[in-house]
Structures are given as structure tokens and as C-alpha cells.
Image (cartoon, grey):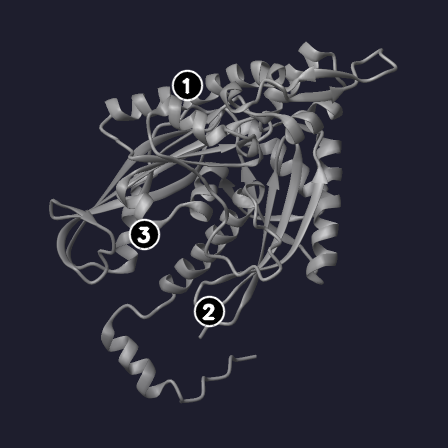
Amino acid sequence: MPRSELVVALDIGTTKVCTLVGEVSGDDQVAILGVGMARSTGMRKGVVVDIAATAAAIRESVAEAERNARADIGTVYVGITGAHITSQTGLGVVQINHEVQEEDVQQALHNARQVVLPPDREIVHNIPRQFIVDGQEGVRHPVGMSAVRLEAQTHIVTAGSSFVANVVKCVQRARLEIEELVVEPYATGLAILTDAERQLGVALADIGGGTTDVALFVDGAVTHTTVIPIGGNHVTNDLALLLRLAPEDAERIKLAHGAARKADIQADEYVEIRMIGESEPREVPRGLLTEISEPRMEELFQLVGAHLAQAARDGVHVSSCVLSGGGSQLSGSTELAQQTLHLPVRSGRPREVIDPGRLVDSPIYATAVGMLHYAAQRLSSRRRVREPRSITAAAFRLLFGWLPKPRPRR
């Protein structure tokens, strides 16, 4: 059994920087060891606007996670998002005429990456969707199958090079090394979606502070990825502007008394607010808050629906939607999404993670937990690549593995 390994996820958001330290066991189970959180002021809609402030928030978040996990952090998996994220389909072909080996799979995946991109864009992910063996579609694990022709259909996610470079610069200024960049909507799906949902077809909408990450999963694999430049902060900003509130007061009132649907509010409910420039607080109907927040949330879900409609025209259909992220915690969001999208909608939390202290039992941690799941998958994949090429080789290792290894020459 391979030994356990520590992995660290760094989620750099518009409102917060979250660091999670996890331990991946030999059977790919992820256990949460520590959490660090810091307020983020150097990001806007997933894009760096202040390198120094972002690097400082990263250092603060990582330091707290180190204390809680009692571990030193040097290397991290870093999440990226923003409207510059796009996706497309890749196809790689290998002629083999023999039993499929792991090397053939890797070559097919490599060939799928050979797409023409503008000079200002780069590939972040090349995720397998399916393999096609001699015309047979829907193959998930082709290794060991006899074949003449192997095709790999992949989901290629690209990002703006300058945006990625600025995120990398912030992490490096925080004196950290990057293991890999992870596109956040894909990571979030790994944390909160069930296997059945991914198989039947599901849309994930992760509502952050400045953006909403959308990913579609069909037949067990991610097929579409996009980022909508609207998030929970837009509701907060509308409340602050229209009610003349300080931003921090608007956020507090939104979380404590806000709702996504006016229909859920009683007519006799009132909320105490203190407007800018006034010395005394005043009471306003709670329904006034929802008159402001409902149109913005409805606009967001309409944009999600437009993306689903476009995917349907491309032949990709989903049967449900899952909400996540801090913005999804606004009361009534699930019901409004269901009403707008005409789909079953549920709220998602991190799952399939060992978390005895319930440190990450909230939608706000879904992306970071998903990055830990991604790290576990990558570790498992690297182990598979190092495995023997055939059953004969495996048997030889079992029979003769007890023999001492030759010492390297000095």
C-alpha cells in the first residue's frame, strides 16, 4: 500500500483566500488536517487586480492552515477562475495494432492536446471524456484491450496566459511552489456531485463572490466549462448602492436577512439598517431587500440557463442542477434556480472526505475540497503509470520482489 501524502489546495477567490491541508491515503481517501482563511481584496471577478494584496492574503491563509494542520506548506494546488476560462473538445488518435498499453493512452491524450490556440491562451486541462477503440465509443479504461486504432476524446480547458501569469506571480510572492493549476468549476464538481448525477447529466453552478463557475458533466465526464462574471458580491453591491449602506453592512444584512425570492417573505417582517450619513438606524421592510436581490439572482440563473440551452443545441443535455459556493447560501436560491431553469435543483456540500471536526461542512469549501480530490486523482494516476506493463511483469514482481535491489554504483 502506498504511503499517505500531504496535499494542499489554495482557493484564491474574490472575497476570501482558502487554504486546505489534506492527507491522501493509499486508497485515495482524503482527510482534512487543517484550514486557513483570509479576506481577499486583491481579486476581482477571478482576476488579479492587486498582486501585493493577493500575495499577503495568501500568506495569511497559508500560515493559519499550517498552524491548524501542524505542517509546513511549500507546494500547493492552485485554483483559477474568471471569464477568460473557455473550453473545447480535443481528439487524439494512435495506431497501435496490439494490446493497449498505458503508454498508448498517454500518447493519445497528448495528441488530443495538439489544437491551434491564439498566442495569448494556454491549455490548463486536457481531461479524458471517453476512449474509442476501433470505432467502439464509450470506453473508459482501454488498457489491456486488443485494438488497431485508439482515439481519445478530451475536454480541453484554456485560460488567458496573462491572467494565469499574474496568479502564478502572487503565489510565488507568497514563497510557495505550484504543483498544478486547477480550473475551479471542474474541481468543485469533484467535491459535491454524486457518480449518478455525473452519469445522468448534471449542471454545477458554483456562486462565488465575483463569478459563478459552471460545469456540465455527462456520462461521467466533464463536457463544458465556463465562468459567468456575476456572483454574490453583485447582490451586496446592489444593496449597498440602493439602500445607501456601507459595503460591510450590506454584506452582513444580506447574510442575516436577505432572500432570493420576495414570495418567501412575510409582509410584516422588518429589518433594522443604518444608512450612510444617518446617526440613527431605521427599519425597512424585509421585502425591500428581496426586491433588490431577486432580480440580480434571477439574472444570474437566466445566464446559467442560456449556457444550458447552448449546450443542448450542441447535443449535451442535463437532468438536474447543483448549486454551491457562498452565494448559493442566500435563502431561497435553490427554489429560484429551480423556477428559472425548470430543472430539479439541490444545494451541494463537500462529500466523500474524512472530516471528523466538520471543518469543511459548508458550500464555501467545495472548490478547495475538490482540489484535494483532484490531487488524489493525480497521485493515483502517477502510480498507475509506474505500474508494470503486463500481467507477466506484475507476476514476476510478486514472485521475485523479495530479492534485494542492486546498489547504485558510486
Label 3 – label 1 distance at C-alpha: 39 Å
Q: Quadrant of residue 28?
A: bottom left
Label 2: few (<14), some (14–19) or many (≥20) C-alpha neighbours in 10 Å: some
Labels 2 and 1: the sequence-earlier one: 2
Kindly identify the amino acid type of the residue bearing the numbered disc 3: Gln
Look at 53% across and 33% down and name the residue there.
328
- Quarter in which the N terminus is drawn: bottom left
Residue 220 makes an appearance in the image: no
Q: Name the residue under label 2.
A: 26
> Tag on residue 29?
none
396 lies left or right of 194: left
C-beta proximity under 8 Å, tags 3 and 1: no
Foreground tag (2 vs 1): 1
- Labels in figure, total: 3
Instruction: Name the element at disc 2.
Output: loop
- Quarter in which the C terminus is drawn: bottom right
Q: Quadrant of residue 387?
A: bottom left
Instruction: Name the element at disc 3.
Output: helix
Q: Position of residue 6 (x, y in %)?
A: 58, 61
Label 3 – label 2 distance at C-alpha: 23 Å
Q: Mark 1 points at which residue?
A: 302
Q: Mark 3 points at which residue?
A: 106
Q: Position of residue 326 (x, y in %)?
A: 58, 35
Foreground tag (3 vs 1): 1
Residue at the farthest right position: 279
50 to 370, vertically: above or below: above
Q: Nearer the viewer, residue 346 or 213?
A: 346
364 to 145, vertically: above or below: above
Label 3: few (<14), some (14–19) or many (≥20) C-alpha neighbours in 10 Å: some
C-beta proximity under 8 Å, tags 3 and 2: no
Foreground tag (3 vs 2): 2
Kindly identify the amino acid type of the residue bearing the numbered disc 1: Gln
